[in-house]
Image: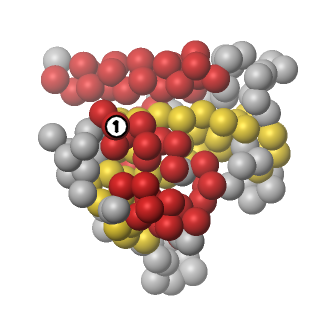
Amino acid sequence: MPRYGLIDSQSVKTIYASEARGFDGGKKVKGRKRHIITDTMGNILAVKVHAANIHDTVAGIGPARRAYEQYPTLKKFCGDEGYRATFEVDVYWEFVLDVDISERIKPTFEVLPKRWIVERTFAWLGNYRRLSKDYEISIESAETMVIIANLFSILRSIA
């Protein structure tokens, strides 16, 4: 049972006039945002897809709630600097859990301990054509496609 959840988000362009679309000002992407929570092995515990204009600190509690409902053994969450403040407070008040925030040491690219696991999972998901952009019209089918792609990567690793 997982005890540590790693959270991150990815902004992707949408192709059609989808249910929820927005503009992510930081990434300059019009589309949706995918939030995933993984365990320390990179297995996805929860997925949440929403409009890209909702900030990580506000939207992060949704996948955290899903992960904690399915895996009450979680003791801590870990996020990047985008999950500071509101997300930390929400997680503490709702689950009485702490959030480890990984801070950048230098302004250049650097692999952060534990954070590379969730980034690696996004890289694995990028190998699937249906996830290169968000082709799905409904949010539920977009979340399902992420889960299916994760299952394919797990099955490929054990075969």
Q: In front here: 44 or 99?
A: 99
Above or below 29: residue 6: below
Residue 86 in sight: yes
Residue plotted at (72% across, 43% down): 52
Above or below 58: residue 36: above
Above or below 82: residue 9: above
Residue plotted at (26% across, 21% down): 156
Q: Position of residue 47 (x, y in %)?
A: 47, 34
Above or below 112: residue 38: above
Q: In front here: 82 or 13?
A: 82
**Tag 1, which secondary structure?**
helix
- Relative side of 30 to 148, left or right: right
Residue plotted at (76% across, 30% down): 20
Q: Position of residue 7 (x, y in %)?
A: 44, 52
Q: Quadrant of residue 37?
A: top left
- Relative side of 110 to 34, left or right: left
* Residue behind mark 1: 69
The C terminus lies in quadrant = top left
Q: In front here: 30 or 57?
A: 57
Question: Which residue reaches farthest bottom?
Answer: 106
- Relative side of 41 to 88, left or right: left
